[in-house]
């Protein structure tokens, strides 16, 4: 009897029980067991440490079980037109205020404005901002932080901001006649 046959005899019952404890359908669990031994047979030459044979076989079995369940995930056909999700009040408030921020960004000094546009609007990292502006990383960080601070001051001069217990913006109210930016 060859090596694969001996391993089949030694581990077949234990692996079948292992697979059956996770997959209730006997036919499918037997198919998975066959798949495990096929993978064992083809991959046995690559096993370098014989002492890890048992754990290697059980890992193959675990992966085969996972593959089976992944393949069983139902697919759902999507409608041609998906409904737009309702915007939560916090998101709506943030969206409204973001429209005010655009003109405020234009009022920033050029070096802060450029740093804010690159980092906050275009999504560049501060390292990329530094490279594009030809300044050091600490210089880029300073410009972004100072730009943010100036925007925060402008916004708080324009509007009364209200935050929830976790510090997220939940509401705002414009201060009459103060804001000329938005």
Image (cartoon, rainbow, N blue to C red):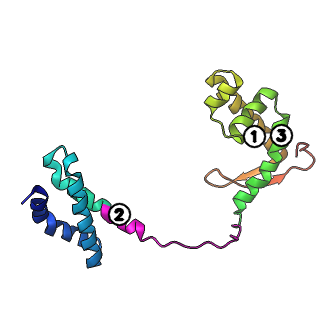
Query: How many labels, in total?
Result: 3
Q: In this rendering, which labeled residue sits more in front, label 1 or label 2?
A: 2
C-beta proximity under 8 Å, tags 3 and 1 = no
Q: Residue 114: which quarter of the image?
A: top right
Calculate the distance from the C-alpha at mark 3 to the C-alpha at mark 1: 10 Å
Q: Which residue is mark 3?
A: 104
Q: Earlier in the sequence, mark 3 or mark 1?
A: 3
- Assign a secondary structure to mark 3: helix
Closer to the N terminus: mark 3 or mark 2?
Answer: 2
Q: Position of residue 157 (x, y in %)?
A: 83, 42
Q: In the rendered view, tell whether residue 83 sits above or below residue 45.
A: below
Q: Main secondary structure of the magenta part?
A: loop
Q: Are marks 3 and 2 in contact (CB under 8 Å)?
A: no
Residue 95 image offset from top left, x and y in percent: 76, 54
CA–CA distance in space, label 3 to label 2: 52 Å
Q: Give the extent of the magenta segment.
A: 64-85
* Residue 72 shown in magenta: yes
* Residue that numbered label 1 is attached to: 152
Residue 66's disc is 2
Residue closest to the far front: 1
């Amino acid at each position: 009897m060859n090596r694969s046959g001996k391993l089949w005899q030694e581990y077949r019952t234990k692996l079948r029980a292992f697979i059956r404890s996770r997959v209730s359908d006997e036919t499918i669990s037997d198919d998975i067991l066959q798949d495990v031994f096929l993978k064992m047979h083809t991959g046995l030459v690559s096993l370098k440490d014989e002492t890890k044979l048992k754990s290697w076989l059980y890992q193959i079995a675990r992966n085969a079980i996972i593959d089976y369940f992944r393949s069983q995930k139902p697919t759902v056909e999507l409608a041609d037109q998906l409904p737009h999700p309702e915007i939560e009040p916090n998101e709506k408030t943030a969206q409204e205020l973001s429209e005010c921020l655009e003109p405020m960004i234009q009022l920033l000094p050029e070096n802060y404005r450029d740093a804010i546009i690159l980092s906050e609007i275009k999504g560049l990292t501060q390292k990329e901002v530094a490279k594009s502006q030809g300044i050091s990383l600490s210089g880029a960080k300073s410009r972004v932080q100072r730009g943010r601070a100036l925007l925060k001051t402008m916004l708080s001069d324009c509007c009364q901001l209200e935050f929830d217990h976790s510090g997220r913006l939940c509401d705002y109210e414009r201060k009459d006649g103060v804001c000329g930016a938005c």
